[in-house]
Image (cartoon, helix red, strand yellow):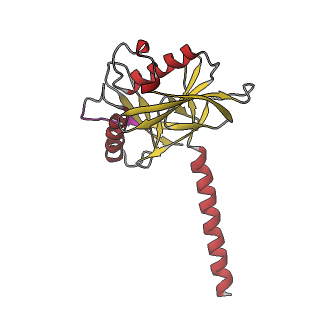
Amino acid sequence: MDFRIRLKVLLMALLIIVLNSDAQTESTRGISKTFGDLIVFTECEPVNEYEVLDEINITSLPASLMSRPPVNYVDVRNLYIRAVNKMNLSADGIIFTLNKSGVSSAVIISFIDNSIANDTSIVSINRGLYCFVDSEPIDSFKKLGPVINKLNLYNVPFKIAREGFLKRCNKQFPKAQGVVFNFKLNAPNSANAIEFN
């Protein structure tokens, strides 16, 4: 008898774990923003199947595209979008790969099936928080408030800005499950802590 009770408890615990992991997976989905004709995937991966058309990085871009060296995330994102548009590849989207100083490369993609919405993505987790960059959560959520970062975080590389906001969010909003970032050109970046409903 004792063995059967333990087995039931173990099975119930496994069922709860599976149900919780399914719920958590669903809240990692986001809708990526479109800039021009390109869907931008930063800190996330497209859900739908795609074909890689090309890969670019800062060193492979022609000097004529750069009026000045890109400093922050928005500079680099806009530079890569201009480069993709000049390449005329009939691209649907661009997936950014990041390094410590910012964007190190971008994969240019074309979706296999364009009859469906292709802007859904699986969002990455950093410091225990879902990071929504150029995207919004699909699931309903409530804003806990703006993340107050004491550093003036603009015109700094992406990862420095992101890490500053995430560290501060964990202290300021311990119950937060994600952060929605708003990176701006030549203005302070901002972020909102969120909790899923």
Viewed as shown, does residue 194 lie left or right of 21?
left
| Residue at left offset 37%, top offset 49% | 174
Quadrant of image for the C terminus? top right
Q: Position of residue 92 (x, y in %)?
A: 63, 23
From the viewer's perspective, is residue 92 above or below residue 30? above
On the question of residue 140 being in view, the answer is no
| Residue 83: in magenta span | no
Quarter-of-image position of residue 26: top right
| Residue at left offset 62%, top offset 22% | 91
Q: Nearer the viewer, residue 59 or 125?
A: 59
| Residue at left offset 67%, top offset 35% | 48
From the image, give the main secondary structure of the stretch colored magenta: loop
Q: Nearer the viewer, residue 106 or 186?
A: 106
Outermost bottom residue:
1
Q: Nearer the viewer, residue 185 or 84?
A: 84
Quadrant of image for the N terminus? bottom right
Q: Position of residue 133 (x, y in %)?
A: 47, 32
Q: Position of residue 28 (x, y in %)?
A: 55, 43
| Residue 150: in magenta span | yes
From the viewer's perspective, is residue 69 above or below residue 97? above
On the question of residue 6 being in view, the answer is yes
Which residues lie in the magenta part? 144-151
Viewed as shown, does residue 162 lie left or right of 22?
left
Viewed as shown, does residue 186 lie left or right of 48?
left
